[in-house]
Amino acid sequence: MDGSNDLLLTALPGIPLVDSDCDIVDLVLAALSAQNLTLKTGDILVIAQKIVSKAEGRMVNLAEVEPGDQAKELARKTSKDPRLVELILSESSEVLRAIDELIIVAHRLGIVLANAGIDASNVAPSTAVEQVLLLPKDPDRSAREYRRRIKQQTGSNVGIIINDSVGRAWRLGTTSLAIGVAGVTALEDHRGKLDLFGVPLKVSEEAVADELASAATLLQGQTAEKSPVVLIHGFTSRTDEQSAASLIRPLEQDLFR
Amino acid sequence: MDGSNDLLLTALPGIPLVDSDCDIVDLVLAALSAQNLTLKTGDILVIAQKIVSKAEGRMVNLAEVEPGDQAKELARKTSKDPRLVELILSESSEVLRAIDELIIVAHRLGIVLANAGIDASNVAPSTAVEQVLLLPKDPDRSAREYRRRIKQQTGSNVGIIINDSVGRAWRLGTTSLAIGVAGVTALEDHRGKLDLFGVPLKVSEEAVADELASAATLLQGQTAEKSPVVLIHGFTSRTDEQSAASLIRPLEQDLFR
């Protein structure tokens, strides 16, 4: 951060329930306009994964999923629905842990999370509980696309973060992660900078996109659909060339698989 | 969050370099007063661990540390200073991983982190590089004490979070954690609440204190001493009876040791 001492987060009211007929950029710009808010270059929009996934048609009807042998076996071991397990496996590159009712995987995007981030809450009315929602196909690409279109329509260069709430090793409770990033620093590299006493900092990369994602979650609320979009004003980004992929720890540096 | 759509974070300017002669509450109230800012009930102060530790005299001169046999052996294995390793061990309940230049432990407070959170940067001018800084003895207690004294002096019930930047499994970069909490929700329990479609949420505890800690870090900057204190206005806390200890995952639920 250079300059301002303030960071202002605003949850955008008026975003309707999203389905695959919706266009996220249109919805966001309409909600901003209804509040007489304008986007300024440097502003950041944090958008909940759930509405991105819905707009991209990532809803799956479990009745249409045919579990394979591996899924059936893992489903027995974990007491989970074999069709859901089939989807989890199809979305993952590796199963890290599997115990009762819990499967922790490396998602094909590189993110380590439970159930491959597949969500069964808030996706459809309870009469249709067989619906589940997968993560977006390529959230970094979606973020870039939103950024490009917003620039086109408003003239402002804004940062986009697509966020999701994810559990953690060692600590209780979810925090939010940036699963898609465009036009804002994902990983801030402080190494080599001097500390207050002129000593170079040695180990200091800060996951600012994850911190921005978590800050926004405080306003999004748990369902993330009451206020799925949060506008952040006042954060100075050092680069706009990173993606959420830059937050994934490379396998060879990973001590906790 | 109920009510407001906005969250405002303000980094307090004018906090001087802290040493063991300083009183954190006095410094914070003076900095607020200099900015004509008043604390309102419900406001949250996020205070960087580093200044709390310094004020509590947690600086240690490595020259005065005598490493034991276990420390010497671990120091050889990790190519670290045996005196620093002695301090790491004395601050920890368990060593989880130890490889070249990296020791990951369960701190006696329960937090899993590298080097037991002992910091060698920003603690003293480079002529005295033998100084390192331990985490506060009992940051939950410090947070409660700050809250009590601020209530006494201002009449306002504020939340206190003492935060520290910590690395993570699976992802690059640090995010901030709440290591001391008073008067603000640490873990928000959404279980049993109904989702937007009336279906009860099953797995949903949100580590709001960690999210507040991370939000503040965006303004604190890496050294956390340029702007070690951040005021958060607009967050509605559901309970004021939790501590940072409630964020520690119990051993028997921990799949990643």
Image (cartoon, coloured by chain):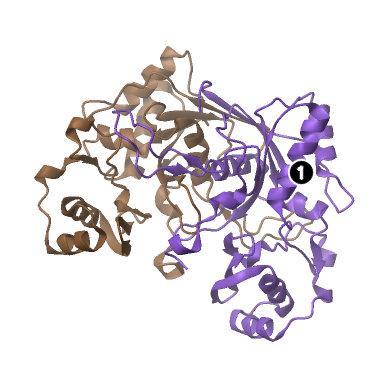
Chain colours: A brown, B purple
- Quadrant including the C terminus of chain A: bottom left
Q: Nearer the viewer, residue A70 or B121?
A: A70
Q: Classify B97 as above or below A30.
A: below
Q: Position of residue B239 (x, y in %)?
A: 58, 35
Give the number of marks: 1
Q: Nearer the viewer, residue A82 or B101?
A: A82
- Quadrant including the N terminus of chain A: top right
Q: Position of residue A12 (x, y in %)?
A: 44, 23
Image position of A228 (left or right of B57) = left
Residue where numbered disc 1 is placed: B145
Image position of A141 (left or right of B58) = left
Kindly tell me whether residue A157 is visible in this rendering: no
Q: Position of residue B210 (x, y in %)?
A: 56, 45
Q: Image quarter for residue A151?
A: top left
What amino acid type should be assigned to the residue bearing mark 1?
Glu
Give the crowd class for mark 1: few <14, some 14-19, many >=20 residues within 10 Å: some
Kindly tell me whether residue A127 is visible in this rendering: yes
Image position of B140 (left or right of A89) = right
Write the residue at 90% across / 51% down.
Answer: B21
